[in-house]
Image (cartoon, rainbow, N blue to C red):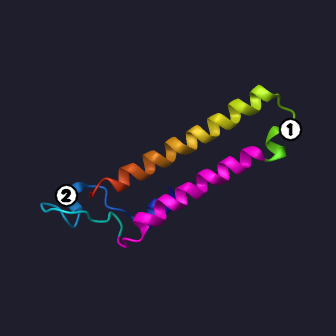
Amino acid sequence: MVLLLVLDPITRYEDCPNYGGNGNASSFDNPAWDLLFPLVLLGWLAMVVVEQTLPVTRRHRGGADVAVRAASAVTLSVLGSCCLFLNVATTCH
């Protein structure tokens, strides 16, 4: 979320550089962020998955509790990443 505040992407279709024309444009000032932003989100998801495999997250919990916690964390991470990315990525395309 902080990264989006720093990058300040275009959020309105009317503000896109290709407004009224054809083609794709980047929602960011630097078009490289069209690739880097999804990679950052994938890295975040990978860190959540790694966190769920650490022994400290399973301490004093049963198998079902660990599975529910891991599934919830991964599901929320995927949904959060998709919501953040798709809103920004589809604005100017």
Q: Who's the residue at 83% across and 31% down the image? A: 61
Task: Label 2: state its secondary structure.
Answer: helix
**In front here: 77 or 9?**
77
Quadrant assignment, res 8: bottom left
Q: Give the residues drawn in magenta, as a range.
A: 29-53
Task: List x then y, in percent, for residue 92.
Answer: 27, 58
Q: Which residue is drawn at 75% across and 26% down?
A: 64
Q: Is residue 33 toward the left or the right of residue 24 in the image?
A: right
Find residue 14 and name its label: 2
Pointer 1: residues within 10 angstroms few (<14), some, or many (20+)?
few
Q: In this view, does 67 lie above or below 15?
A: above
Give the image location of residue 88, x and y in percent.
Answer: 37, 55
Residue closest to the far left: 20
Q: Position of residue 22 (x, y in %)?
A: 16, 62
Q: Quadrant of the C terminus?
A: bottom left
Count the marks: how many? Answer: 2
- Classify residue 72 as left or right of residue 22: right
Q: Residue 59 carries which label?
A: 1
Q: Is residue 92 left or right of residue 19?
A: right
Label 2 amino acid? Glu
User: Magenta stretch containing residue 36, yes or no?
Assistant: yes
User: In percent of the image, x 63 and y 53: which residue is there?
Assistant: 46
Residue 63: image x %, image y %?
Answer: 80, 29
**Please, is residue 73 above or below residue 8 in the view?**
above
Q: Magenta span has 54?
A: no
Among numbered discs 1 and 2, the one appearing first in the sequence: 2
Q: Is mark 1 on a helix, strand or loop?
A: loop
Disc 2: CA contacts within 10 A as few (<14), some (14-19) or many (>=20): few
Looking at the picture, tell me which residue is in the foreground, 71 or 19: 71
Disc 1/disc 2 C-alpha distance (Å)? 51 Å
Query: Which amino acid lies under the numbered mark 1 shown in the image of this protein?
Result: Arg
